[in-house]
């Protein structure tokens, strides 16, 4: 559906309701990355030795970088070293 078709078929009131919904319930890659990072943190926490520093959710978030032309589209960044928390 094009933007023009959308504007013809959906009222202003419905668009406003969708905007309010999406503001309250975010979707997209960033939210999915956050959800999986939270899951990884929760699954890892029971295995951390007592007295050791527990990893923060940011340790599980992928580090995205812009790619130079011709490079593959894989995620770049330093992987977490699990020995840091054992």
Image (cartoon, rainbow, N blue to C red):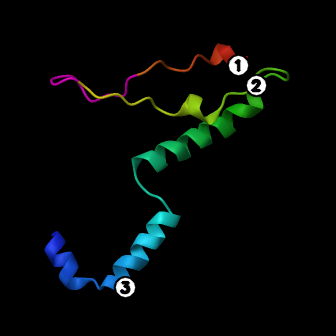
State how far apart marks 2 and 3 are (Cα).
Answer: 50 Å
- How far across and down, in percent of the image, does residue 79 sit? 50, 20
Q: Which residue is mark 1?
A: 85
Tell me whether circle 2 and circle 1 mark residues in contact (CB < 8 Å): yes
Camera-near label (2 vs 3) is: 3
Q: Which residue is mark 2?
A: 48
Q: Can see residue 20?
A: yes
Q: Which residue is mark 3?
A: 13
Residue 69 against residue 37 in the figure, above or below:
above
Residue 49 against residue 12 in the figure, above or below:
above
Q: Specify start and end residues of the magenta stretch as a single range.
A: 68-76
Q: Indicate whether residue 64 is drawn in magenta.
A: no
Task: Please state which of residues 8 and 54 is positioned toward the viewer in this rendering.
Answer: 8
Residue 30 against residue 14 in the figure, above or below:
above
Q: In the figure, is residue 69 to the left or right of 50?
A: left
- How far across and down, in percent of the image, does residue 3 sit? 18, 70
């Amino acid at each position: 559906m094009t933007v023009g078709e959308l504007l013809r078929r959906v009222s202003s009131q419905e668009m406003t309701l969708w905007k309010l919904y999406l503001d309250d319930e975010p979707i997209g890659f960033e939210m999915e990355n956050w959800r999986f990072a939270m899951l990884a943190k929760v699954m890892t926490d029971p295995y951390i030795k007592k007295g050791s520093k527990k990893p923060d959710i940011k340790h599980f978030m992928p580090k995205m970088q812009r790619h130079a032309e011709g490079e593959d589209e894989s995620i770049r960044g330093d992987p977490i070293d699990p020995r840091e928390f054992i």
